[in-house]
Image: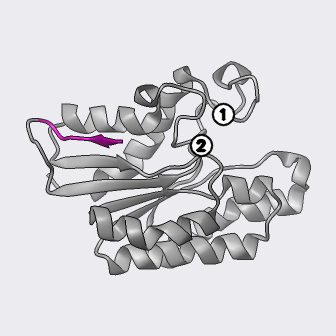
Amino acid sequence: MVLAPWGAVAAERSILVVGDSLSAAYGLPQERGWVALLGERIKRERLDYSVVNASISGDTTGGGLARIDRLLAQHKPAVVVLELGGNDGLRGLPIAEMRKNLAAMVERSRKAGARVLLVGVYIPPNYGPDYTKEFFDSFGELAKRHHTALVPYIMQDFALKPEFFQPDRIHPTVEAQPLMMEQVWKALRPLLKG
């Protein structure tokens, strides 16, 4: 999905979102997902950016790493939003591997001239307190080490409110999408010129 900026056929600069089901609007109409809402916000603010949603439900950091070079070459983004890792955690994959994959995506995005926003997520506590804490802490540690912008937790505003989740209790509802967009917007806006 590509959302054109206000009053322009094609923007000079793009924001590339590489994510999983949280960014792919799983179970919802695409136009109601937080990424589409971000595109609308950018139009309202009259910023000369387009939003490209390259998110795939079920994607892992390994999948994102396998796709990142092609996406960077195709879209030449000014900003890359990385919202990956949740599926790594849900599959119990090694956290060190997730960190390595995210770090590689950050480095490749930077090498391509893009600023990077890393988006953190939690995983359910049934993986044990040590794994859960190390998983969550990884996002902040990576952002600090690589000097990227960070959304500590995209579901911060509603994580403990079951009414904001679909019946699977993992994927947010339509009502949650504006809250997710606002979490991203706060960290993204300083990265945008104009």
Q: Say if mark 1 contacts mark 2, CB within 8 Å.
A: yes
Q: Residue at x 53, y 52 (%)?
A: 19
Residue count near mark 1 (Cα–Cα under 10 Å), binned few <14, some 14–19, many ≥20: some
Q: Is residue 51 depicted above or below 193 in this figure? A: above
Q: Which mark is residue 171?
A: 1
Residue 140 locus on image (x, y percent): 59, 64
Q: Residue at x 20, y 31 (%)?
A: 44
Q: Which mark is residue 21?
A: 2
Q: Main secondary structure of the magenta part?
A: loop
Task: Tell me which label, 1 or 2, sits earlier in the chain.
Answer: 2
What segment is highlighted magenta in the picture? 1-6
Q: Is residue 3 magenta?
A: yes
Number of residue marks: 2
Q: Is residue 53 magenta?
A: no
Q: Quadrant of the N terminus?
A: top left
Gap in angstroms between the C-alphas marked 1 and 2:
8 Å
Q: Residue at x 72, y 35 (%)?
A: 170
Q: Is residue 129 left or right of residue 58?
A: right
Residue 65 locus on image (x, y percent): 54, 71
Does dot 2 land on a helix, a strand or a loop? Answer: loop
Does dot 1 land on a helix, a strand or a loop? Answer: loop
